[in-house]
Amino acid sequence: MTESEKAYANRSWTLVDFVIYNKTTKLPALAIEVDGMAFHQADSEQAIERVADCEVMIINKVLVTPELIDAAPSLKLICESATGVNNIDLEYAASKGIPVRNAVGYSTSSVVQSTFMHILSILGEGQYYDDCVKSGRYSRMDIFTDPDMTWNELEGKTIGIIGMGKRTSP
């Protein structure tokens, strides 16, 4: 076990919102077991109650305010189980010497896939045709097509991708 693994082996953690672990879980990256508490979504009052004894706060949607940070006097680390940290008062955490970590790159392939899905939906007027079918207009058309809509083909199209970051690599 490395020094880093030993440092966190005996610390308590609280997963403030979203249950994804049992009370005792093996952290694969550290190959150790740690004791902690896991809860489903929490409002701000519940979150304050839940973090009282934690050293590691694992959150997802909960707003991490100065009040929440102060409610955890033993807090040593805040872990965001998503990419964005806009729900955490980063300046206040830093002023208390509490590092913040997030899950970088965990959904890279999904983001790329969603991007292409949206591109194809926009190109193919997906929302228009979805509305057309759901409203019953499509079934009332004599020729089962809308002559006022043009069909966009992928053939001959070029796409420009700006910012070849980690998300565009897969």
Image (cartoon, rainbow, N blue to C red):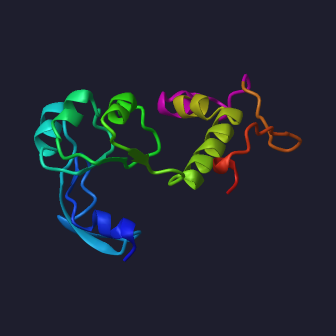
Answer whether residue 84 is visible to the viewer in this image: yes
Point out residue 30 in the picture as x, y percentages from the top left corner: 37, 70
Q: Quadrant of the C terminus?
A: bottom right
Please check the rendered image and state whether residue 38 is part of the magenta-colored stretch, yes or no.
no
* Residue 122 place in picture, x, y as percent: 66, 33
Which residue is situated farthest in the top direction here? 148
Magenta-colored span: 132-148
Residue placed most toward the observer, 41 or 37:
37
Residue 22, x across and y down, in percent: 20, 65
Q: Position of residue 65 (x, y in %)?
A: 27, 29
Residue sitting at 57 percent across and 31 percent down? Answer: 127
The residue lying toward the viewer, choosing from 73 and 65, is 73
Residue lying at the far right of the rendered structure? 156
Residue placed at 37% from the left, 77% from the top? 1
Left or right of residue 93, residue 147 in this image: right
Examine the image and state in which quarter residue 157 appears. top right
Image quadrant in which you'd find residue 38 = bottom left
